[in-house]
């Protein structure tokens, strides 16, 4: 075995945890917080709308964090992460924010997660957000490859496809039908056991 | 707070765990396995010598792993890692090998560790090693910076100084006196509490 070490670059929401904004929408009753990039294709427009909704509804960061701290990882996620961390290197890449992810990270056993940042004002209101970089998942995969890793990427959604395309192998986990149709080159799996088998096949 | 997210790039041996080859030397009684890059400056010559010693003494990878599995992280290391993982992103960078690190990784709570690889033959004898890349710690720090992180690097030894130099801030943890004299630009700390205080000062 003289091949490169492997690294698993994995999406978080939909793969290990519920979709955070959708859960916040459900628990706060603010219907429009359900909108995603499927409804509003420009991410910045979508995020500005979300921040506006938080402001209109007087929700502070702490309020949102309280909602998020009632969430749990998906059933089987913690066991999957343990399995993966004993046989390879896992880095979770998410477009979500450190301030949202913190309560869930601990419940997942503190895996390494690369996120973006929310900006709050003195009243704990979320006033802005900062991306670590544009198309951060894709660039993280490129960075891992540049330092000698074979990368297997796993995601569920359109915002994961650029990292799946850059990885040595890409896997769709619980994707929608459209994404399977649009990206037939990626294997699609729906349960953690299938995902394990596919990752082993890809050298993890 | 509109600054970049922070990432802590930290050495493993001497910072979180004992020096593995030295412990293997002690427990097997093979005195020459104590040699380090301080004694043999060419790393490849040093490693070839170590592999030769393993062969001469009929030690398989499994034998070495049995020795390593009796080791524990340094006192306070696990608590430090937990503290760090709840406030920042930790990646441990080591020149050691996945096959050596595995038993210690679990005892540290499965942090993310970038390593090198040992090559075994059909008799479980270690016959070769592969570096992920030359000067891997330094290049990992450069990669993290290239994807938008502010990097604080921590190490104890000469093989850490190139990553400390590339990081936004470098800290020496329990260094020898020579290294402190040679690199006066880095803060030197000796206890985890001091290290925490220094890392907080550097934005972690």
Image (cartoon, coloured by chain):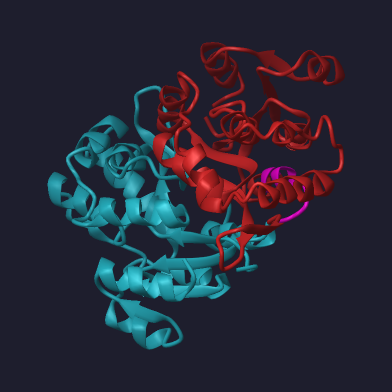
Chain colours: A cyan, B red
Residue in the picture at 71% in, 16% down: B187
A69 lies above or below B82: below
Q: In the rendering, at what x and y percent does residue A198 appear?
A: 38, 75
Q: Is residue A11 magenta?
A: no
Which of B103 and A131 lies nearest the eye of the viewer?
B103
A150 lies above or below B73: below
In the image, taking residue A52 as reference, residue B185 lies left or right, namely right
In the image, taking residue B155 as reference, residue B75 lies left or right, namely left
Residue in the picture at 63% in, 61% down: B119
Which of B50 and A42 lies nearest the eye of the viewer?
B50
Residue in the picture at 55% in, 44% down: B64
Q: Is residue B140 magenta?
A: yes
Q: In the rendering, at what x and y percent does residue A79 appear?
A: 26, 53
Which of A122 and B163 lies nearest the eye of the viewer?
B163
The quadrant holding residue A159 is bottom left
Q: In the rendering, at what x and y percent does residue A187 appear?
A: 39, 81
Main SS category, magenta section:
helix
Question: What is the count of numbered marks?
Answer: 0
- Can residue A13 be spotted in the picture? yes
In this picture, which residue range is highlighted in magenta? B133-141
The quadrant holding residue B199 is top right
In the image, taking residue B165 as reference, residue B141 lies left or right, namely left
Residue in the picture at 50% in, 74% down: A169
On-image quarter of the C terminus of chain B: top right
- Can residue B111 be spotted in the picture? no
């Amino acid at each position: 075995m003289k091949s490169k070490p492997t690294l698993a670059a994995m999406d978080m929401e939909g793969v290990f945890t519920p979709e955070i904004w959708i859960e916040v929408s459900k628990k706060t009753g603010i219907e429009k917080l359900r909108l995603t990039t499927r409804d509003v294709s420009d991410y910045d427009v979508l995020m500005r709308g979300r921040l506006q909704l938080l402001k209109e509804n007087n929700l502070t960061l702490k309020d949102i964090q309280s909602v998020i701290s009632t969430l749990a990882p998906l059933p089987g996620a913690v066991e999957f992460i343990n399995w993966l961390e004993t046989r390879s290197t896992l880095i979770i890449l998410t477009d979500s924010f450190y301030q949202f992810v913190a309560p869930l990270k601990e419940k997942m056993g503190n895996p390494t997660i690369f996120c973006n940042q929310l900006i709050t004002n003195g009243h704990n209101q979320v006033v802005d957000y900062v991306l670590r970089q544009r198309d951060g998942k894709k660039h993280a995969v490129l960075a891992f490859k540049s330092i000698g890793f074979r990368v297997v990427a796993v995601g569920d959604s359109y915002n994961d496809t650029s990292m799946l395309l850059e990885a040595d192998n890409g896997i769709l986990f619980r994707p929608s039908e459209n994404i399977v149709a649009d990206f037939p080159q990626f294997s699609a799996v729906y349960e953690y056991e299938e995902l394990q088998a596919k990752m082993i096949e890809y050298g993890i």
